Amino acid sequence: MATIDDPQDPRLEPYLRMRDRNLRAEAGGSHFLAEGRLVVERAVEVGIALESVLVVDTKAPAIRRLVPPSTRVLACKKPVMAAAAGFALHQGIVAVGRVPAPPTLEQVVANARAAGRAGTLVVCPEVTNVDNVGLLIRVAAGLGADAMMLGPRCADPWYRRAVRTSMGTVFSLPVVRYPDVSGPESFTADLRWLAGPAGYDLVATVTDPDAPVLAPRARRDTPDTGTAVLLGSEGYGLDAEAVARCTRRVRIPMHHGVDSLNVAVAAGIVLHAIMQEREPRSE
């Protein structure tokens, strides 16, 4: 454990002005920032490699006991931490970790079926708000999805705010991502594979007034049929091409002139109904 008095200390480089965009780019996407004790605890629980933790000195002994011996603990006073980060960190703790190897879609589907599940995926072609991406990961994990697919135009799920709003569930929920260069083609090909050989039911969430109203237990899947729920962008929803690839459309019934919900809220409602469809009907 090291005590730091200078906000320009070289050991604070990953934390300076909390530039996670630069950190992600300069490290080739291999590092991320985790803010808050609960998020750091969850990283430790699932074995995420933490290189260092920056913490206010009063909390440093407890954090030293929490993290592995290989993790450097950097302790400082609150003003030093605020000067380095560029703003006051509410919980007084932030860590630099290494992003685990991402899974492929084929691995996710195979793992679900090996576990005796047909598989449930949350698919986001273009969700650009970092906080929404984090909330979606938390919702998907909490309601039992097997994984998420984030298209190439989605916000980075390993940005500090996304990691924080996911409450660390990004460490345990598989997230399939697509590179910027070949991403659109790979993403489209994987959707075709899901709807074809993989045998998935692709569900488009829409606001179209002629779409069927979301209804739990509307159908019973066969044991081999997985479900992929497609959620559109915050401003425009799913484009026509994405909807055309889907097996069916669903809409959430709305009232009082409200036409749509926040994407994470909508995901929770739709995913809850989809998971109920997995339960066998009582005779």
Image (cartoon, rainbow, N blue to C red):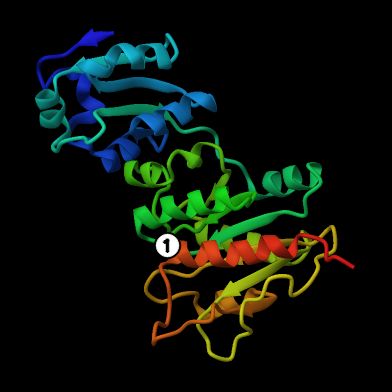
Q: Position of residue 22 (x, y in %)?
A: 27, 39
Q: Say left or right for 115 vs 24.
A: right
Residue pushed farthest right?
Answer: 283
Task: Please determine whether, in this image, residue 218 is positioned above or below residue 130.
Answer: below
Q: Say left or right for 255 vs 62.
A: right
Where does label 1 land, which residue?
127
Q: Position of residue 239 (x, y in %)?
A: 49, 77
Q: Residue at x 60, y 62 (%)?
A: 271
Query: Which of the image's four quarters has the C terminus?
Result: bottom right
**Residue 189 appears in the rendering:** no
Q: Position of residue 216 (x, y in %)?
A: 68, 71
Q: Quadrant of residue 97?
A: top left
Q: Position of residue 68 (x, y in %)?
A: 45, 13
Query: Which of the image's four quarters has the N terminus?
Result: top left
Q: Residue at x 64, y 75 (%)?
A: 245
Q: Quadrant of residue 114?
A: top right
Task: Please determine whether, in this image, residue 278 is positioned above or below residue 214.
Answer: above
In this orientation, which residue lies closer to the viewer: 46 or 186?
Answer: 46
In this orientation, which residue lies closer to the viewer: 40 or 21?
Answer: 40
User: Which amino acid type is marked by label 1?
Assistant: Val
Q: Residue at x 54, y 28 (%)?
A: 46
